[in-house]
Image (tube, coloured by chain):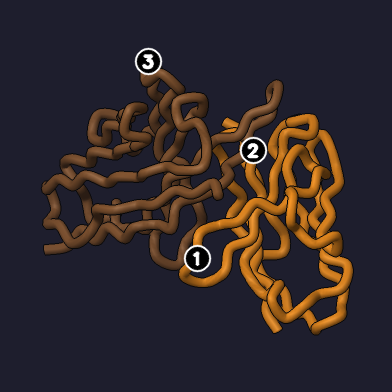
Chain colours: A brown, B orange
Amino acid sequence: EVQLVQSGGGLVQPGGSLRLSCTASGFTFGSYLMSWVRQAPGRGLEWVANIKQDGSDKYYADFAEGRFTISRDNARNSLYLEMTSLRVEDTAVYYCAKVAMAAAYNWFDPWGQGTLVIVSS
Amino acid sequence: DIQLTQSPSSLSASVGGRVTITCRASQNIRDFLNWYQQKPGKAPKLLIFAASSLQSGVPSRFSGSGSGTEFTLTISSLQPEDFATYYCHQRWTFGQGTKVEV
């Protein structure tokens, strides 16, 4: 079964840091682009960052640029999101997702179970 | 950047009824459009990719159509488990969601 299991998250003060993890199973992790997507309470989905299969290229949403770092360890089948200088507005459930691609098409499947990050004093 | 606008934002429907959700893109995206279902407290689930391709395991009452700038997700006969929020998606952009309620 293709599966993504997330860990990390929790309560952090504004300006603080947090690291999220996502462990993959059931597929060849190193062969896929991976992403983080977040969802603020009661709001819609918002893409955060991507990382290419070998980790050589990384792409970020504007709000994440310079504060968040996406990384991966293919030997451990793991994806990470290091978040620094956290703001109250970063409060959200963060999902990891495998990016399925076919020609120029891409979609997210599957998704991790999500992990809640609360930024509050 | 491409914007995706869903309509309506919410709708009320009955079991057995037909539901149609529209997603409009701010520019031509050919058929690079996907649909997801999200239930409260759960991760999104892929329903449709490439505008009209049904993901494996998804019931055939779900269908997608459209190309260019206008797309539709249709649920032909709404079931109790279909009450959820639906999102369209293209590349790294999502629509704002449509909540399907009783």
- The amino acid sitting under disc 1 is Lys
Query: What is the spatial separation of the Cα atoms under label 3 and label 2, in whole angstroms?
Result: 23 Å
Q: Above or below — where is A6 with respect to A43?
A: above
Query: What is the spatial separation of the Cα atoms under label 1 and label 3, in whole angstroms?
Result: 31 Å
- Graded by Cα atoms within 10 Å as few (under 14), some (14 to 19) or many (20 or more), the crowding at tag 3 reads few
Question: Left of B65 or right of it: where is A113?
Answer: left
Residue A22 figure quarter: top left
Q: For mark 1, what is the residue?
A: B42
Q: Which type of secondary structure does the marked residue at label 1 adopt?
A: loop
Q: For mark 2, what is the residue?
A: B90
Q: Are marks 1 and 2 in contact (CB under 8 Å)?
A: no
Going from the N terminus, do you reach mark 1 or mark 2 first? 1
Which marked residue is nearer to the observer: mark 3 or mark 2? 3
Query: What is the spatial separation of the Cα atoms under label 1 and label 2, in whole angstroms?
Result: 21 Å
The residue that appears at 57% across and 69% down in the rendered structure is: B39
Q: Above or below — where is A92 with respect to A30?
A: below
- Graded by Cα atoms within 10 Å as few (under 14), some (14 to 19) or many (20 or more), the crowding at tag 2 reads many
The residue that appears at 49% across and 49% down in the rendered structure is: A3
Q: For mark 3, what is the residue?
A: A56
Q: Residue A79, how many percent across, how many down?
A: 35, 37
Q: Residue B32, how many percent across, how many down?
A: 72, 34
Q: Residue A82, how many percent across, how many down?
A: 23, 38
Quarter of the image with the C terminus of chain A is bottom left
Q: Chain of mark 2?
A: B
Mark carried by residue A30:
none
The residue that appears at 27% across and 35% down in the rendered structure is: A68
